[in-house]
Image (cartoon, grey):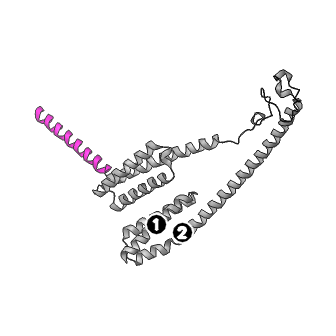
Amino acid sequence: MMRISYKLAVIFLIGIIFSFSFIIFSGCGVSVSLESARNRVEDAKMAVQDAKDANVESYSPKNMKAAERFLSEAEQALSTNHRQRAYILANKSKKAIESAEADAKQEKTVSEEAVTQPEISAQTFPGATRQPNVFPSDIIVPKGAEQLEITKKSLPDTTNIYLKGDFQTLDMQNRIQAAAQALDAAQKAVESARLLLSKLQVDVELSRMDANIKLLQDSNAPVEMINLIKTWYNQSQQSALLGNYEVSIKLFQRIQAYIQVLTTSIQ
């Protein structure tokens, strides 16, 4: 009886282990639709391309290479209908891109902080400080003096001349600072105008969204492609709200290209 009870206990324990294993493994497997996997891979592909256009690779080459590797593996998994793997790899690619962009932003911030207006001292200009064996231009050399050996001790007192050079240096420094301030103000004005132009362009493209979607529906375009374009419109709108107008415009360019290809192929 003891042996039978022991065997039954072992069998019961093994059954419990298998039951928990089945529950755990079945709970971890979240079903991913083909459309979701395809959209996520397209998002990752677009993120990689945008990072390349922004020259992020020069600031974070390691993360960029990782993002491209994950994207390639995701595309391969999608082509073999491994939707779950494609979805996960696409997410890894986007996270690597986010890390690369963060590194690039940090590097740019450090570079911008390091760039300051040039400090101009009296040593920058000739005549502002005493230079050995250098004669100021307004010293009158007596006739025949060029035939003599002139030393530093034989030079006349040029204190007033050097003081004059210091005043000239200060005036030149003030002029350069004023020019730098004017240039900075002009650059800010150009940047503000560029942002305003980008915002207006984004607003115009967003106003065409409903008309473009209706055009695709009337042309009997595939539902998956219409949903994908709607997703891009939403992403563009979110980027515009965050002030990333360049990203929004790139999304619109991609949308227009897809719409042109779809309408042409259907006709």
In the rendered structure, find residue 11 and report the number of the disc placed on it: none
Judging from the image, what secondary structure is the residue with disc 2 in? helix
Residue 50, placed above or below residue 133: below
Residue 88 visible in the current orientation? no
> Who's the residue at 15% across and 34% down the image?
6
> Crowding at label 1, few (<14), some or many (≥20) Cα neighbours within 10 Å?
some
In the rendered structure, find residue 255 and report the number of the disc placed on it: 1
Is there a contact, CB below 8 Å, between mark 1 and mark 2? yes
Residue type pointed to by label 1: Ile
> Who's the residue at 75% across and 38% down the image?
120
Judging from the image, what secondary structure is the residue with disc 1 in? helix
Left or right: 135 as drawn, with respect to 75: right
In the rendered structure, find residue 205 and report the number of the disc placed on it: 2
Q: Position of residue 194 (x, y in %)?
A: 63, 60
Instruction: Based on the picture, tell me whether residue 37 belongs to the magenta stretch.
Output: no
Could you tell me what secondary structure mostly forms the magenta stretch? helix
Q: Position of residue 179 (x, y in %)?
A: 75, 49
Residue 203, placed above or below residue 143: below
Q: Give the position of the N terminus as an image quadrant.
A: top left
Which residue is situated farthest in the top direction here? 153
Residue 55 visible in the current orientation? yes
Residue 55, placed above or below residue 168: below
Residue 102, placed above or below residue 82: above
Q: Position of residue 243 (x, y in %)?
A: 58, 57
Of marks 1 and 2, which one's residue comes earlier in the chain? 2
Q: Residue 173 lies in what quarter of the image?
A: top right
Residue type pointed to by label 2: Glu
Q: Residue 196 lies in what quarter of the image?
A: bottom right
Image: magenta residue range: 1-30
Q: How many marks?
A: 2
- Measured Cα–Cα span from mark 1 to mark 2: 10 Å
> Who's the residue at 60% across and 66% down the image?
200
